[in-house]
Image (cartoon, rainbow, N blue to C red):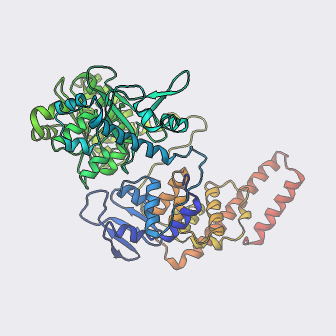
Amino acid sequence: MAGRIPQQFIDELMTRIDIVEVIDARVPLRKAGRDYMACCPFHDEKSPSFSVSQQKQFYYCFGCGAHGTALGFLMEYEHLDFVEAVHELAGQAGLQVPVQAGRDAPPVSKDLYGLLEQAANFYTRQLRESRHAQRAGDYLKQRGLSAAIIERYAIGFAAPGWDNLLQFLSAGNTTLQAQLAKAGMLIEKDGGGYYDRFRDRIMFPIRDQRGRVIGFGGRVLGDETPKYLNSPETPLFHKGRELYGLYEARKATRVLERLLVVEGYMDVVALAQHGIHYAVATLGTATTRDHAERLFRITPTLLFCFDGDRAGREAAWRALENVLPVMHEGRQAHFLFLPDGEDPDSMVRKEGSAAFEARMTQASSFSTFFYDNLMKKTDISSLDGRARLVELARPLLSNLSEGVFRHMMLARLGELVRMEPGQLTKMLKQVESGPKRAGEKPKIQARRARPESRAAKSPVRMAIALLLQQPRLALQAGDLNRFAGFQVPGIELLVSLLQQLQSQPQLNSGALLERWRGTEDGHHLMRLAQEQHLLPEENWEAEFCGALDNLYAQGIEQRKENLLNKSHIGELTPAEKLELQGLFSLQNGGRSS
């Protein structure tokens, strides 16, 4: 949902902006009947399949399934988070974004960003001015880093000492000291007071996608341990989501054809020193699903680089497992293993950028690494070994989304174990459905948008679909109390939509979809918004009212059956007897009002 930005502002913003103008400024659109079309900006295609509906304020690609509102488009196309996308649209609409206190999470103080930026500036000055600066400078020269690269990545130095940063930024101000501790820069002593977290280390500022400093990584100059020390988890810094060097990579190249994922800060800057400006590093953790999803939003191709030893291959496999759920057609992941004892830093310095990039062309594809790794655990020359391979692969492949890539991974498994892909697909579905537990809801499979006839929809589905086409139909719904107590699937969502639209008839479809962003109901609404409708517009009001009448009749029939069942076992109360008589009278009397 909207978080700390008031929902009323999101509503106003979505009614002010026009999705056609937002997208056309970035992807040229052409009129095609009621809607607008273009080649999809999220996957390669020759024929336009990217549709933008001005009426629904919604976009959908019939090729790759990308869909959403104007906010969603900016988040995907410009690689913005929700708040950043709101600010971008608000700027276009000439609106000032208000902020209110949120309940879900404590607000992040802007002072933390300011303090961390001051800390970064302090460390860069220390690299020049500290009496220990010569040793730090010699170390960086030894690693082959130029002044330009040091400046580009704002590399600095935390000099030896327990309170250098503490004294420079807080000078006895306990409030500032508490803020610095909250930002991860100070550690509180057991007996009270604070001391610097980073001491005698080369400092690498970690920036978010807007270029703000959110944390640091510090590397020792010698052989002390730990070799690298990262900022702890803070309100600004979450290592499972952030990547070192991503801001700099995007700044260096507007359109990134690929990203190279490495394990260390020095790997990133050493590669940049040799002209490879598209490397990023995880921050002391394995590649997570959040990492992968974020990177795939920026580029369709990821190349993971690891040491060739056992630890490197285990780290690569963990990365593959986390990438699995976000892999689909149009996305590629490759795995490059370096000779034992080498890392990207040492390798690129030893052989140069041309030779290093040549190595990348020899990287294993996702499918090759996947099956090669599994086949090391079994002997597929035997029947038992092939069965074992299927059992190893099935739970992993079940994490892949439906589509061409999943089909091809199953086809490759079929080749290896000499089975038809269709048989493997059936077995995979058995894994996905699994044994049903009491109270467990069935999984809903996503599907591509397609035209649906009136007969294909329940009354609830028809009413919601038409509301997303024309929200003003809600004014024709009449008194919503007549649906109270009905136990029809989906009716709560429908009534909630109607209540919103009757109280705020100015809301458009995009505003409605944003109100349910990130919820399970929101996913259902997005799917309905994708559908193409066969009904001509002049029939919408009649069909909408007809759907509500059918829903009302369905609810009445359901209530009547419940009361009749109670009557058969003699459990009806006097009030329920009167209600049952009234239901029969209403049904015989004709149309509801």
Q: Residue furthest right?
A: 574
The quadrant the C terminus occupies is bottom right
Please tell me in which quadrant of the rendered image residue 218 appears. top left
Percent coordinates x, y for residue 6 in the rendering? 58, 58
The answer to whether any part of residue 378 appears in the image is no
Q: Residue at x 40, y 59 (%)?
A: 74
Q: Is residue 446 above or below residue 116?
A: below
Please tell me in which quadrant of the rendered image residue 408 appears. top left
The answer to whether any part of residue 242 appears in the image is yes
Q: Residue at x 87, y 50 (%)?
A: 573
Percent coordinates x, y for residue 545 in the rendering? 63, 72
Q: Nearer the viewer, residue 445 or 241?
A: 241
Q: For the image shown, how many numbered marks are present on the structure? A: 0
Q: Nearer the viewer, residue 590 or 249?
A: 249
Q: Is residue 35 above or below residue 114?
A: below
Q: Residue at x 47, y 72 (%)?
A: 55
Please tell me in which quadrant of the rendered image residue 29 appears. bottom left
208 to the left or right of 379: right
